[in-house]
Amino acid sequence: MSRSARALTLAWLVACSVLALAPAALAYEGELPIQVAVTGPGSTVCGETISLTATVLDSEGAAVPGRNLTWGAQGSGSSVGTSSSVTNAQGQATTNAVVGTDGAVFTATVDGARGSQVVECDLGAAGLPRTDGTPAAPPVGTLLALLLFLLATIAGLRSLARVTER
């Protein structure tokens, strides 16, 4: 192995060692020994029931089974199906939840660590009519298509004018 290849290998090993030790070296006093992540849809139709999953991991990123978890919901008309559950072998716990008309923030708490998922309320395909008297603006794509059509029409008329002048 050449000298430069050995130097590159040594540099790679040093970098990997530093990265492996960095989490422990960068820990801070008061750091929670676990972390909680809540996953679910980002939006749903108002009043629909959704499924949420909380995943509990230790500071090394390994799943934490058998932990008691507390669920909560914030938002008008929002609720969780179960107020508490226990994590399974994969460190996960699930619950059903209902999203109220203002959307919701669902939380899962374990030993002081907390995770949350924001879920917006979608009025569905029909939605509600505008009541503020302001007409809805056309989509940007429609305006762009109209502009391109007008430019093509003008260019076509100019070409036609040139042909008829000859």
Image (cartoon, rainbow, N blue to C red):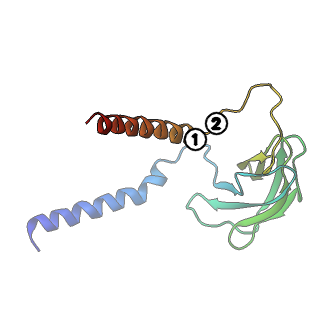
Amino acid at dot 1: Thr
Q: What label sits on residue 138 in the rendered view?
A: 2
Q: Position of residue 58 (x, y in %)?
A: 62, 60
Q: Residue furthest left?
A: 2
User: Which of 137 and 117 lies nearest the eye of the viewer?
Assistant: 137
Kindly identify which residue carries mark 1.
142
Picture quadrant where residue 3 is located: bottom left
Q: What label sits on residue 114 in the rendered view?
A: none
Marks 1,2: beta carbons within 8 A:
yes
Instruction: Give the residue drawn at x 62%, y 43%.
Output: 30
Viewport quadrant of the C terminus: top left
Q: Secondary structure at mark 1?
A: helix
Amino acid at dot 2: Pro
Q: Position of residue 21 (x, y in %)?
A: 42, 57
Viewport quadrant of the N terminus: bottom left
Picture quadrant where residue 134 is located: top right
**Is 9 drawn above or below residue 21 in the view shown?**
below
Q: Position of residue 59 (x, y in %)?
A: 58, 57
Q: What's the distance in space between the residues labelled 1 and 2, CA to CA?
A: 6 Å
**Is 164 drawn above or below residue 56 in the view shown?**
above
> In this image, 81 relative to 25: left or right?
right
